[in-house]
Image (spheres, coloured by chain):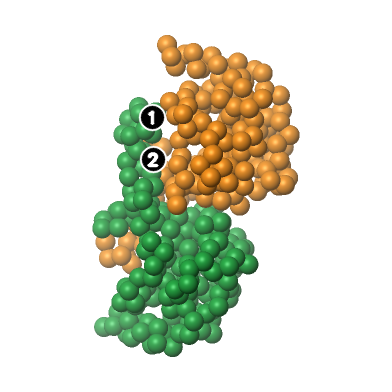
Chain colours: A green, B orange
Amino acid sequence: MKQSAFMLLAAVAVAGIVALSVTASGYPDEKATPILGIRVFAGYRDWKLISVAHEEGNLNDLRAVLGNDIAINAYRQGKLPLPDGAMIARLAWKYVASEENNKAFGRSQSFVAGDPTNIQFMVKDSQKYVATGGWGFAQFKNGKPDERADLNTCFPCHAPVKDRDFVFTRYAP
Amino acid sequence: MKQSAFMLLAAVAVAGIVALSVTASGYPDEKATPILGIRVFAGYRDWKLISVAHEEGNLNDLRAVLGNDIAINAYRQGKLPLPDGAMIARLAWKYVASEENNKAFGRSQSFVAGDPTNIQFMVKDSQKYVATGGWGFAQFKNGKPDERADLNTCFPCHAPVKDRDFVFTRYAP
């Protein structure tokens, strides 16, 4: 029931969003196809590290969360909510055992990043994304936007961390 | 036997190393105490992401490997050996289950970065570190240099990946 309400909110947000001309800290937009007005930003791979994580289960990945300068500065200053213009990229790769590393360690213990799975972006614009906590969400696989159906699940999942501005990841010092 | 030879080489390198005045891409050195001539670089946390990993066993950590601009550019161009001036930082944090994330996912699957454990640096200087493949190694805990005894084990462990210029981590796209 609660989840349905969030889904509805997210759907409303999707319907209301017009293409954003977001440019990442001076980087040109790389991909022509936007998703909910968000593109794959040419420079996202140069953004700074917020933290890392591992998800088991169906995801079975290793992930890194990067932020543009606006996001990183806010994180380091403990500033919440994050200001407009903040952008967060979640990169993920298959969780792969490294035989090479295991040999060096002399035991099976090392897991490294394999092929990339998908990339998610959160873009803060408190005006445009008012129905989803000020955040626009997008997911790309192989540089191509994911189905909108997938995206409707983004905001509901982030809703439980509303007191942290809907962002799960904490800064890793 | 083979390992002993490497240990010896590493010890020779340690003895021969004079304090380096390495400055990371224009960043000032932050810590006054160098280890093998290598300091904790004030800007290392701003370096770009090379890849991520998880080590089980005694280490039980999540880790990120960052590179300064010289290292990142060489990685992206597939340039081996990495040129002089390349610097790599290995950050690691305790491997911690995230109850918060698990609630959102509806299952126990999420592991995140906890408290930092230690930081390791590799600094390329083919003249100064000639006995250890052109690499200087350093490890810091809480900003303080680790025992030299620990460091003598760095190079022998990296020796098996000589054909990748003694660097384990591959670039994660």
Q: Which residue is mark 1?
A: A105
> CB atoms at circles 2 and 1 under 8 Å apart?
yes
Q: Can you say whether A9 is above or below B78 in the image?
A: below
Taking depth in this image into account, of A42 and B1 the one nearest to the observer is A42
Q: Which residue is mark 2?
A: B55
The quarter holding residue B168 reads: top left
Q: Are marks 2 and 1 on the same chain?
A: no
Q: Can you say whether A101 is above or below A69 in the image?
A: above
Residue at image position (56%, 56%) is A46
Q: Chain of mark 1?
A: A
Q: Secondary structure at mark 2?
A: strand
The quarter holding residue B57 reads: top left
Q: CA distance from mark 2 to mark 1?
A: 10 Å
Residue B86 appears anywhere in the view: yes
Residue type of the residue flagged with mark 1: Phe
Tell me the quarter of the image containing the N terminus of chain B. top left
Q: Can you say whether A9 is above or below B79 in the image?
A: below
Residue A128, percent from left and from top: 51, 84
